Amino acid sequence: MIFVTFHLVGLFCGWVGSVRISGKENIPSGGGVLYLSNHISALDVFIIPWVIYSEYPRAMLRQISKEELLRVPFIGWWLTKLRAFPIKRGKGDIGAIRTVENFIRADQVIIYPEGTRSQDGKLGPGNRMVGKFIRSARPAVIPVAIKGTNRVVPVGKIIPRRGADIEVTFGPPLRLDEELEIENVRESSVRIIEKVMKEIASLLGESAGAAEAPAKMAPAKVEDAKG
């Protein structure tokens, strides 16, 4: 399924317009990698994995997705086959959190730290829980910026539009030594996600104003992944 998806997404991108990729040299080959990207379209969950697989076809890549998205007919089934795993919003679940952290330690994982798609295309604040994942799992953190997918499949739409240019930029691994040394877990997690969001904003060419807003905290339940 991953092989088929890789080629279908490539064909789709050629039909839509063009995809420009920067920073391929920043895509690691092994596990213990966390990609953190802005989120502007449902298309993001296919484009970013496609770029990573184009460099490392055998990568053990996983992706956190909202539980509601995985319930969408066909799309949910397809994403599950691509090793997406669902996240439930609500009361925190220690077992679920450990599952996510174990995936991050062993594999390559994609998370959209804003927690939802941007309605206006601008970067919002990140979720402090993501900072906590980083503090616990200590992965290589790769910031990612994606542009143009919201012009292909805007929020609330399902029919793709042609003629848009998509850009995906991978930044170098973040140095988080100072933030990780902070003893207070809450403060450390906030500082980590703030730095992540500032770097994503920089890759997008946006001001860091939204990234400097107080980081959100939404406890989550994560179901066991398939595949």
Image (tube, rainbow, N blue to C red):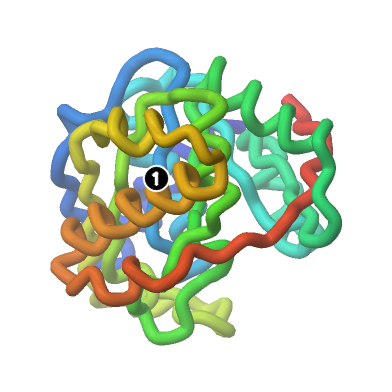
- Please identify the residue farthest to the front as the structure is shown: 183
For residue 7, say whether it is visible.
no
Q: Position of residue 169 (x, y in %)?
A: 21, 49
For residue 209, say whether it is visible.
yes
Q: 130 above or below 31?
A: below
Amino acid residing under circle 1: Ile
Q: Which residue is mark 1?
A: 192
Is disc 1 placed on a helix, strand or loop? Answer: helix
Q: 161 above or below 111?
A: below
Q: Nearer the viewer, residue 180 or 201?
A: 180
Image quarter of the C terminus: top right
Q: Position of residue 163 (x, y in %)?
A: 24, 76
Taking the image as shown, residue 93 lies to the left or right of residue 99, namely right
Looking at the image, which residue is at 51% across and 81% down?
Answer: 155
Looking at the image, which residue is at 50% across and 32% down?
Answer: 135
Image quarter of the N terminus: top right
Q: Quadrant of residue 124?
A: bottom left
Q: 227 above or below 182?
A: above
Q: Position of residue 188 (x, y in %)?
A: 45, 42
Looking at the image, which residue is at 77% across and 60% down?
Answer: 89
